[in-house]
């Protein structure tokens, strides 16, 4: 069994520790990205390295902070050895200690994503075992904006589930902040489904019907000799319509930005250095 640690542009002593462990144990390999490219890019850096190495029949993706318990990885491997499963997915029994707002936000995200993309993502995680064939499929997908959890689920290949308790963080603190989580959530939805654009279209049709009804009412009041009242109503309508228009433009802007990122076709990541007997060669 080989271990591949991906250093996503850390600024502490992580890479030095990986290098030292690799020198002490030939089974430990590491790659260091030139800067922080984000969780999704780091995952695909590891998957693509595994695919190119042409060694091993499966891979387990897990966090290095011990919140993904190693004993569950052993259980995943046992299920895979039993045959019939291309993916073994880790499902959280319960989320770690979080604020109610964060838990509510996570539930809302998975509900919206599930309804828009048609995938059940409740309590899923990046903690997965993937058969080599699944890795080959994922690494061949050309999109720059990736959502690993959903992409693995999307393949529809035979999947087993393993339930686990989220472990205590071995060290450090999470770098995820509310705004970062919001960006990740909205970016994941935008990169995987066009449902928000359909919502914009639906809102436009709804307000068009509302405008026709309101216009007919105003004309009836005018021709019947009744003065049209409601200056406050006009102001509120302008504010509501303006808010909807700005929100719609924002959603469309996110999709345009995604298209812009895709057409540039820049690499998802850049590997600055690699160590180990299996993956050990320097790249730039």
Image: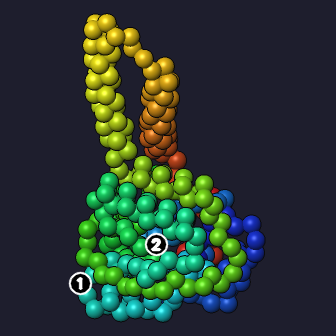
Horizontal side of residue 146 vs 158, given as left or right: right
Foreground of the two, 233 or 157: 233
Question: What numbered label is drawn on residue 84?
Answer: 1
Question: What numbered label is drawn on residue 267?
Answer: none
The quadrant the C terminus occupies is: bottom right
Give the foreground label among 1 and 2: 2
Mark 1 and 2 residues: CB-CB less than 8 Å, in contact? no
Query: Within 10 Å of the Cα at label 2, are there few (<14), some (14-19), or many (20+) other Cα atoms?
Result: many
Task: Answer above or below: position of 250 versus 233.
Answer: below
Foreground of the two, 30 or 116: 116
Quarter assignment of residue 116: bottom left
Where is residue 175? Give x, y as percent: 66, 66
Horizontal side of residue 229 vs 172, given as left or right: left
Query: Within 10 Å of the Cα at label 1, are there few (<14), some (14-19), or many (20+) other Cα atoms?
Result: few
Q: CA distance from mark 1 to mark 2?
A: 21 Å
Foreground of the two, 1 or 90: 90
Examine the rendering and report whether any part of residue 48 can be seen. no
Residue at (28%, 6%) from the top-left corner? 223
* Label 2: element kind: strand
Quarter assignment of residue 157: bottom left
Find disc 2 in the rendering and name its residue: 126
């Amino acid at each position: 069994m080989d271990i591949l640690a991906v250093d996503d542009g850390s600024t502490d002593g992580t890479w030095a520790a990986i290098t030292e462990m690799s020198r002490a144990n030939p089974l430990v390999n590491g790659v260091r990205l030139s800067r922080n490219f984000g969780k999704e890019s780091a995952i695909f850096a590891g998957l693509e390295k595994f695919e190119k190495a042409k060694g091993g029949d499966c891979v387990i993706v897990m966090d290095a902070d011990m919140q993904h318990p190693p004993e569950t990885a052993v259980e995943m491997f046992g299920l895979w050895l039993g045959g019939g499963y291309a993916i073994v997915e880790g499902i959280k029994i319960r989320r770690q200690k979080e604020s109610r707002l964060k838990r509510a936000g996570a539930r809302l995200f998975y509900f919206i994503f599930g309804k828009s993309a048609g995938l059940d993502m409740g309590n899923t995680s990046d903690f997965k075992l993937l058969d080599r064939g699944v890795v080959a499929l994922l690494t061949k997908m050309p999109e720059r904006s990736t959502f690993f959890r959903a992409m693995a689920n999307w393949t529809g290949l035979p999947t087993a589930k393993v339930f686990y308790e989220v472990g205590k963080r071995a060290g450090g603190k999470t770098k995820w902040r509310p705004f970062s989580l919001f960006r990740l959530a909205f970016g994941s939805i935008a990169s995987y489904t066009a449902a928000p654009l359909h919502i914009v279209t639906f809102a436009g049709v709804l307000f068009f019907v509302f405008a026709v009804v309101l216009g007919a009412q105003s004309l009836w009041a005018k021709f019947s000799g009744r003065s049209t009242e409601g200056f406050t109503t006009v102001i509120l309508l302008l504010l509501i319509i303006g808010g909807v228009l700005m929100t719609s433009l924002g959603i469309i802007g996110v999709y345009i930005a995604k298209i812009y990122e895709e057409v540039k076709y820049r690499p998802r990541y850049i590997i600055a250095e690699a160590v180990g007997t299996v993956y050990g060669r320097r790249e730039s």
